Image (spheres, rainbow, N blue to C red):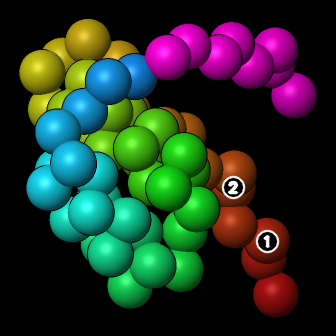
Amino acid sequence: MAERKSFLLRVDPEVLAQLQAWAGEDMRSLNGHIEFLLREALRKAGRLPEPTSPPKAKR
C-alpha cells in the first residue's frame, strides 16, 4: 500500500457535522469519506485517472 500522509484540516463545525453524518450513513470513517469525496472531485476535474478494476474471472 502507498505511504499515507497526514495534515491538519480546519473546517466549519456545521460542515464537519454534516460530513460525519454522511460518513456514518455510508459506513465509512470520517477520514475515509473525506478522501473518497476528494478523489471523486479530482476525477471529475480530470486531475486523477479513473480507477482500473481487475479483470473479472471467467467461469
Q: Which residues are magenta?
A: 1-8
The residue at the point 53 percent across, 80 percent down is: 27
Residue 18, above or below 42 = below
Q: Quadrant of the C terminus?
A: bottom right
Residue 55, above or below 36 = below
Q: Read off the residue under disc 1.
A: 57
Amino acid type, label 2: Pro
Rendered location of residue 30, percent (x, y): 50, 56
Q: Read off the residue under disc 2.
A: 55
Q: Secondary structure at mark 1?
A: loop
Q: Residues within 10 Å of mark 1 (few under 14, many from 20)?
A: few
C-alpha distance separating marks 2 and 1 = 6 Å
Q: Quadrant of the N terminus?
A: top right
Find residue 4 and report its image quarter. top right
**Outermost residue to the right:** 1
Q: Secondary structure at mark 2?
A: loop
Residue 3, above or below 22 = above
| Closer to us: 14 or 32 | 14
**Does residue 38 appear anywhere in the picture?**
yes
Q: Is residue 19 magenta?
A: no
Amino acid type, label 1: Ala
The number of callouts visible is 2
The residue at the point 38 percent across, 65 percent down is: 20
Find residue 46 and report its image quarter. top left
Q: Is residue 7 left or right of residue 22?
A: right
